[in-house]
Image (tube, coloured by chain):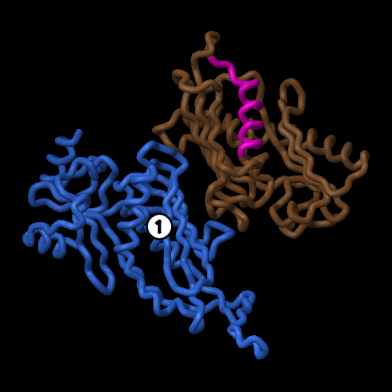
Amino acid sequence: MRRRNDGRSLNQLRNIKIKTGIDLTVDGSCIYNQGLTEVICFIRGPRARTQNNLIVIDYSSSPFSNIDAKRNSSFDKEYSMFAENLRESFENLVLLDERGKSEIVVNVCVIQNDGSSKSAVFNAVTIALLDAGVRMRDFLVSVNVGLYQGDIIVDMTNEEQRDAQGDLTISYQQRQCKIDYYELKTLKLNSNEVLWLSELAQQKAEEVYKILRNDILSIKRNEL
Amino acid sequence: MKKFIQEGILVNVRSDGRVNKEIRQKKSTHGYLLYTNGSCKVECETIIYTGITLELQNQPKFSIKIQSIKKSQTDKQKALYLETLLQQLYDLDMKNLWISEKKAFVLNIDVFMLAEINEAYAELIAFSIQNAIQDLKFPEIKVTQNLLTSDEEYELQENKFRKIDLKIPNISVVGQVGLQLVKDLTFDEFFAVEKKYIISKGERLQVRQFEQIFEPFDSDDFLRVVQFI
């Protein structure tokens, strides 16, 4: 079986490690590691609303997250678009008060980007919201798949993402079995390849869901 | 709370059970970040990531930038204060950073912390920077001269590193309550003590009082602090 540069098989996810409750001054927090990709998320709220949106997202990356990391990431168009996507995804999921007078503030930062950082961000926010005890309609997970050197692979590293012919990131609502966010970056893919990527992404999202669910349950059981 | 901490320090008992001279265990992981030339992750009261990236410019220098995931209104002011203070205290010997007559290394030190930026974390930030500098690897650069244009050309030698001794001073913060001095202050202790000194101990010894950097202070206090450290 063909192995990738880091020794994984084509279908293998990297090790996922989560750590919650890292900061007791906020309502929910989480450090999410997927291989060498590290994302930190802090949740404040629900609290009294100060802005128009139900969820306020502050998405950024640290200056040393990647070789191309810029200092002023909040002014970058790609960052602001992704932050908007995050906000929409989670606004559809969270269940706050009926009068709509609450808000949740989400600070999420990519400490180190070794590939699949967008899917790591989605997963980190989900875990942090669970740590904060925010009620949600569904369990949102995310995964990244791609076409690299003719092979369909899962959970790409930074090196693989740079040279991939196709790069698909999805976020998936596990209970309703619906894809919520779908971003495909491609040079040239035929319709079959797009279909295979989408199917593999959904399968792997189920696998990520099981891993995250087991991890968060064991953390919370140990806390009790 | 403030009085509780002060009274404890006076009898050599701190709120976390330590004595006045005792320092906390800090977990530090070197080489944590991939895309840096030197890095460190420090876990103590909060988590601080420090990454150092190198550039080549006409003059050697180093710059410190402090950021936090938590943003507040006084963020920028406090970051600027800490950056300026630490740059003054880190009186690094820049002569070793020259690689040729025209080019030298520039150290960009980025500090990222998970707590709000506050002067109470000055010692922890300094500890993190010190560890990152210890982890720093300077790449070997081959300098040649272009015979046509007589300009210098620089070639990075892969997997080869040069050793540059930067002689980093040790920076610590000492608090004073009455005549008692206390090391390694926690966040609450920092705001509870009557006076706070920041000390840089390297080739030169620098002692400054927080918030009164440009004013002279009592010589007895100075002697007491120097003996304490």
* Chain B painted colour: blue
Q: Is residue A216 above or below residue B115?
A: above
Q: Is residue B56 visible?
A: yes
Q: Is residue A151 left or right of residue B71?
A: right
Reply yes or no: does residue A95 show up in magenta: yes
Q: Is residue B25 visible?
A: no
Q: Is residue B76 left or right of residue A90?
A: left
Reply yes or no: does residue B132 show up in magenta: no
Q: Residue at x 24, y 61 (%)?
A: B199
Q: Which segment did they paint magenta? A: A80-96
Q: What is the quadrant of residue B4 in the picture?
A: top left
Q: Badge 1 is on which residue? A: B128
Q: Is residue A102 above or below residue A58?
A: above
As drawn, the chain in brown is A
Q: Is residue A177 left or right of residue A212?
A: right
Identify the amino acid type marked 1. Answer: Ser
Q: Nearer the viewer, residue B18 or B76?
A: B76
Q: Position of residue B217 (x, y in %)?
A: 11, 57
In the image, farthest residue toward the bottom: B147
Q: What is the quadrant of residue A123 in the picture?
A: top right
Q: Quadrant of the N terminus of chain A?
A: bottom right
Q: Position of residue A197 (x, y in %)?
A: 84, 40
Label 1: chain letter? B
> Badge 1 local density, few (<14 within 10 Å), some, or many (20+)?
many
Q: Residue at x 62, y 75 (%)?
A: B159
Q: Nearer the viewer, residue B112 or A137?
A: B112
Q: Position of residue B194 (x, y in %)?
A: 14, 45
Q: Residue at x 41, y 53 (%)?
A: B27
Q: Position of residue B211 (x, y in %)?
A: 21, 50
Q: What secondary structure predominates along the stretch shown in magenta?
A: helix
Q: Is residue A154 left or right of residue A76?
A: right
